[in-house]
Amino acid sequence: MLYIVPTPVGNLEDITMRALKVLREADLILAEDTRTSGLLLKHFDIHRPMLSYHKFNEHQTVERIVERLKAGEQVAVISDAGTPGISDPGFLVAREAIRADIEVSCLPGATAFVPALVASGLPCDRFVFEGFLPQKKGRQTRLLQLAEESRTMIFYESPHRIVKCLQQLIEVFGAERPVAVCRELSKIHEQIVRGSLADALLHFSENEPRGEFVVIVGGRPEEKKEKTMNHSTDNPS
């Protein structure tokens, strides 16, 4: 059995009892960073073998892991924070395990974008999860593709790029587009800055960005889309 095990995005009390049970019983724990995960396991007095499993070695590691699963071992996958596979390593080993007819179980648990979305105050009945935008090639192209998106959009961003990210969002979506910029979710210094993209840019230009960010951007209002369509009909040229 391969277990996908969510771990807290901040507050360690957010881990589930089932997650702790699976980690205590696993023959092997695949960890994105064994140093980071080692602190988590030590906190809960869990002592199981760990193996580093991250985006730079997952293609070389996955075949070995599948062989161990075929041999009957119980393997748990964890990332530094949140649910593996969501902008973190985990998808590849899950896919290959399924191809090898190995049962895969994903435990419910923490992921950063869900609390950010719900607390944003923006519509959360329909949304688009974009994760991390391409850092260079394809970044602007992807943003332009999202210009007509009417659903709420979710992006992940680092503190080093958040100001530039907000500037780029303004260029494509307009300065008045509503946004909620969330950082340090579930931690002591949790903060959500709500308002327009211009408001958020001003705030983080004046205050040093720290922590990992989830950016929730409102979709394009339907009435604007309708006006654009009507204008195009009236002026076919």
Image (cartoon, helix red, strand yellow):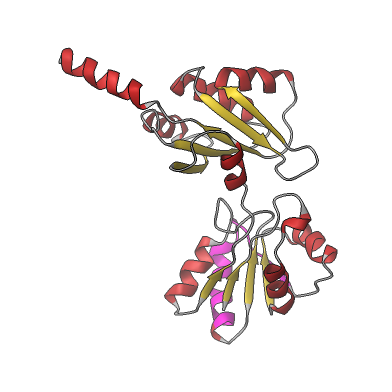
For the stretch drawn in magenta, the main secondary structure is: helix
> Where in the figure is residue 159, as x and y percent of width and height?
68, 33
> Where in the figure is residue 106, as x and y percent of width and height?
56, 67
Magenta stretch bounds: 50-69
Drawn side of residue 198 relative to residue 8, left or right = left
**Image-quadrant location for residue 204:** top right
Seen at 76% across and 75% down, the residue is: 48
Relative to 86, residue 172 above or below: above
Is-magenta flag for residue 57?
yes
> Where in the figure is residue 133, as x and y percent of width and height?
51, 38
> Where in the figure is residue 181, as x and y percent of width and height?
62, 31
Relative to 237, residue 117 above or below: below
**Image-quadrant location for residue 80:** bottom right
Relative to 231, residue 164 above or below: below
Drawn side of residue 119 relative to residue 219, left or right = right
Residues 235 and 171: in front is: 235
Drawn side of residue 59 relative to residue 80, left or right = left
Relative to 76, residue 229 above or below: above
Which image quarter is the C terminus in? top left
Q: How many marks?
A: 0
Which image quarter is the N terminus in? bottom right
Q: Is residue 232 visible?
A: yes
Seen at 40% across and 32% down, the residue is: 146
Q: Is residue 133 visible?
A: no
Which residue is farthest bottom?
A: 71
Seen at 55% across and 28% down, the residue is: 179
Seen at 63% across and 30% down, the residue is: 162
Is-magenta flag for residue 200?
no
